[in-house]
Structure formats: structure tokens, C-alpha cells
Amino acid sequence: MKKVLILSGSPRKGGNSDTLCDAFLKGAQTAGHSVEKIRLSEQKINYCLGCGVCNRTHQCIQKDDMKDILNKMVEADVIVMATPVYFYTMDGQMKTLIDRTVPRYEEIAGKDFYFILAAADTDQAMMQKTIDGFRAFTQDCLPDAHEKGIVYGLGAWQVGDIQGSPAMQTAYEMGLNV
């Protein structure tokens, strides 16, 4: 049994990327894994101050929900990072979370990563900048990270547009095969 942590960057509960997270979650639970989903918009995660204290202490001076989330990231075997795509990149909630991993990012080692994206655009190639951002974090910064899969939820503009799309089945199967 693996410990799976899903980080949903969607500001909309039940939004398209959040719905894809639920399909992944269902698959992973069906396979017998321990799964937790955290909706970033429901957490208090302040912006990084760039003060540099965490470079020496490995602790952030800010008192918000990021400390607990970071602990869960360190403890997880699998991390799913999901975001709606705004102007061809990840949303602010997800970028803020990534910035705030600095105190312990080297401890997020040896994890399997899945990326979930939902966008109004129907051209998968237009999502490359978002994937590049995730890869800059996981491949360039984290020790021994393993990219295991990407779910592209394309053509999803309004809430619910993702329902019935092939991306729903892809998300479920990726979760099932964690």
C-alpha cells in the first residue's frame, strides 16, 4: 500500500481539474492505497517572503498551513499535482505551494509524481509550459523524482465540462495503477 497525496490547485471545488483529482483518488483507493486530497484554495498558504531564513533553519518563519502540507509531501510515496491552466501555465495556488517547499524540498526525495491539467484549450501542445513548470520543480530541484504520468483535461472551460471526457478514465486508471 502506498501513501498518495493529491494537491488540487483548483480554486473551484468540483472544478474540472478538481474533478480529475477525484477520479484519480477513486482509482487509487480502489487499488487499496491510502489517499489524501488537499484543496490548496481551502488552506492558508502565504507567499514566500524570500527572507532566506529557511536556507539555514529548514523551517519557514511563517505560521500557516504550509508546514503541515510540507510534512505530508515528505511522508508521501506518490504526489499528484493538479492545476487548471491559466494563460498557459499553472495557477497561483500551485506556484505558491511550490515556492513554499524550499525549507524541506530536498526531503521530497524518491517520490513518484503525476500531473493533472485542465484547460479550455483543446491543443495538448499548448500545455507544455505548464508541464515545463512542474518538471522544473520535480526534475531539476527534487532528488530522484519520478514522473509517472500526465492527465490532460482539454476543452474544459465551464465547471463540469470534463465529465464524460477521456481524461476522466485516464485519471482513474492512473490512480488504479499507482
Image (cartoon, helix red, strand yellow):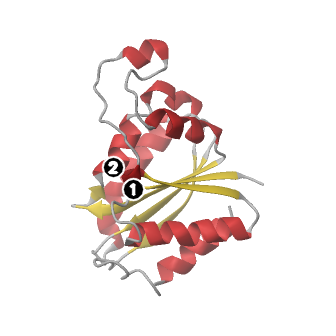
Picture disc at residue 145: none
Tag 1 and tag 2, C-beta contact below 8 Å = yes
Q: Compared with residue 85, is residue 38 higher up or lower down, i.e. above or below?
A: above
Residue 79 is situated, as x and y percent measured from the top left of the image, at 57, 50
* Left-right relation of 51 to 167: left
Q: Quadrant of residue 137?
A: top left
Residue 114 placement, left or right of 129: right
Assign a secondary structure to mark 2: helix
Q: Which is more N-terminal, label 2 or label 1?
A: 1
Q: Amino acid at mark 1?
A: Gly
Residue that carries the numbered disc 1 in the rendered image: 9
At 51% across and 40% down in the image, what residue appears? 69
Give x and y (percent) for residue 97.
Answer: 39, 42
Name the residue that disc number 2 marks.
93
| Residue for point 40% across, 65% down | 117
- Between 102 and 67, which is closer to the camera in this rendering? 67
Give residue 3's position: percent from left, percent from top: 69, 50
Considering the image in quadrants, where does the C terminus appear? bottom right
Q: Nearer the viewer, residue 82 or 122?
A: 82
Q: Secondary structure at mark 1?
A: loop
Can you say whether 85 is above or below 20 in the image?
above
Residue 89, image quadrant: bottom left
Near-viewer residue (74 or 117): 74
Q: Amino acid at mark 2?
A: Gln
Disc 1: CA contacts within 10 A as few (<14), some (14-19) or many (>=20): many
In the shown orientation, is residue 27 left or right of residue 62?
A: right
Q: Is residue 11 left or right of residue 101?
A: left
Real-space CA distance between mark 1 and mark 2, rounded to the nearest whole angstrom:
6 Å
Within 10 Å of disc 2 (Cα), the crowding (few <14, some 14-19, many 20+) is: many
